[in-house]
Image (cartoon, grey):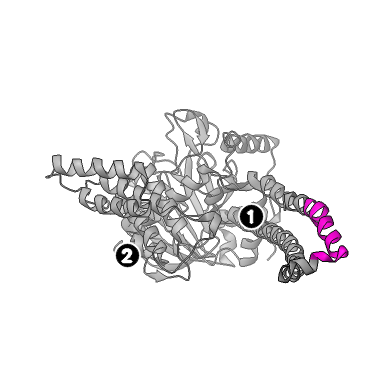
Amino acid sequence: MARKIVHLPSWKLIFVATALLRALVDGQSADNEQSHSTAVAGMEQLLRVESELIDNLSSYADELEQKLNVVRSFVKQMRKENDKALDDPVHYLSNPLNAFSLIRRMHQDWTHWQHYMQQPVGEQQVSYVQLRREQLPSSTDMEEAGDALHRILVTYDLNVSDMAQGLLNGKKYNVSLNALDSYALGMYYYDQQKFGYACQWIFQAIEWLQGPHKLPLPLELDRAEVFHVYAEALIKMNRYKDALQVLHTAATLKKDNLKLLLRKSELETLIRTEPNVVPKKFITPQAQAYERGCRGQYPQNSKLHCVYNSTTSAFLRLAPLKMELISLDPYMVIYHDVIAPSEISELQSLAVPGLKRATVFSQQSMRNQVVKTRTSKVTWLLDTLNQLTIRLNRRITDMTGFDMYGSEMLQVMNYGLGGHYDKHYDYFNSSVAADLTRLNGDRIATVLFYLTDVEQGGATVFPNIEKAVFPKSGTAVVWYNLRHDGNGDPQTLHAACPVIVGSKWVCNKWIRERQQVFRRPCLANSKNV
């Protein structure tokens, strides 16, 4: 049965939508960081840049090899002539031709060889690397990547040694971290003054260095310096005797290093003067409701059920949707197989060119800001952008029974390394953010489409009601943010758990309440409903 497409009629809505888009993305342009780690789609570009840099380094090696081959070929030829002369120098030099040739070689050839040796090699390749530097991750990217791994480590209660060896949440992957990776993480934790974690990661670097592995010469770590930093981290944990042993090893590697010898002497004095210092215990944070939800530890005792929804709209009588009831307070359902793979692919294609770092509205500054509590990239798509966005909005109406007029645009998000969104509410505090709710009201409901499966992590959890929804491509979760009296429902506190392994894509729609006045009327007290 063909369905009539109703186009949004008012030029005012276009103006409001444009203003809303500008307000939602306001503040992003001021942040020049590319935030590479916050979206898998963004890191794909880094891989392409790395491939080009490797090609450039290979070209550099080719130039070096070409020069090396020239030198080696003539060294062989010159050595042969010189050996012949040295066998019987008098006989060789008695011949006037040999004597002249020697004088000529020593006067001319070695000047040319000097000039050839002085000629720079690979200047073009060096310039290319410099040109690409703007596309490389910054120190902020490194810090965000460290934050992400720590978030995964703590949220899922992982072990540092396991993570370094590629064992993530009980599953072994064919990947591991080398000494450079582990040492960088150790330095990240040291700078964050999390010395217990710093000790563990630097120890992983030391173990790697003591194995059969080797780093290329330009990337070699100063082993004495690694041991020194490890000792300093141990000192911060009051593990003085362990630190002294480590400093002894460092001093053995660099016997004449005055700095190491002095630090060792200071520590020996410290041990004598403070013999009863108790080492600090390494304490891991205790799991709260949020962490338990991310780990899949909520009780599975739901007595609710699955149905074919054929009543929310007239169209569903012909094409009912598979609906799973998750909660009644707040109202929450999951729709299965509600978006097709072809639609998902098109949504991702539309989103990728415009992906920007996600922001959060600040009630203090009344602006959207980049924050550490939300790490993903987003694109906003106008409801009337094309037939797909029109069709999805129509489908959301079928799923919820709500009118989409005046609601927010579709938001497509991609999560990257440890991508998450910390605990938050979708509704606004109208008393503080009145400007955001005056025109179309508050966010009465949220519709969240999962566009990809996620191998590990990435669940949407509701800690206050102990419900968790794990990403499954083609499904969508719907919940009401407001109670029947129009006030925000604190039971809807939710979070997006860190992604461990996978690329998490979602698309969400925040539905505003003003247009729903006759579809879900406000009542004085929700308890009487």
Question: Do the CB atoms of the residues marked 1 and 2 lie less than 8 Å apart?
Answer: no
Residue placed under numbered mark 1 in the picture: 45
How much space separates mark 1 and mark 2, taking CA atoms?
43 Å
Q: Quadrant of the N terminus?
A: bottom right
Q: Is 111 one of the magenta-colored residues?
A: yes
Label 2 environment density (alpha carbons within 10 Å; few <14, some 14–19, many ≥20): few
Q: Position of residue 211 (x, y in %)?
A: 40, 67
Q: Residue at x 43, y 69 (%)?
A: 212
* Label 2: which secondary element: loop
* 486 relative to 104, above or below: above
Residue placed under numbered mark 2 in the picture: 302
Q: Nearer the viewer, residue 159 or 431?
A: 159
Foreground: disc 1 or disc 2: 1
The magenta segment: 93-112
Amino acid type of the residue tagged 2 in the rendering: Ser
Q: Position of residue 473 (x, y in %)?
A: 53, 65
Q: Residue at x 17, y 44 (%)?
A: 271
**Does residue 155 appear anywhere in the picture?**
no
Q: Position of residue 336 (x, y in %)?
A: 50, 66
Amino acid type of the residue tagged 1 in the rendering: Gln
Q: Position of residue 16 (x, y in %)?
A: 63, 35
| Dot placed on the residue nearer the N-terminal end, 1 or 2 | 1
When asked about the image quadrant of residue 28, the answer is top right
* Label 1: which secondary element: helix
Q: Residue at x 32, y 59 (%)?
A: 157
Q: Is residue 239 toward the left or the right of residue 158 in the image?
A: left
Q: Is residue 505 toward the left or the right of residue 3 in the image?
A: left
**Does residue 492 appear anywhere in the picture?**
yes
Q: Is 313 one of the magenta-colored residues?
A: no
Q: Is residue 38 toward the left or the right of residue 55 in the image?
A: left
Label 1 environment density (alpha carbons within 10 Å; few <14, some 14–19, many ≥20): few
Dominant secondary structure of the residues highlighted in magenta in the image = helix
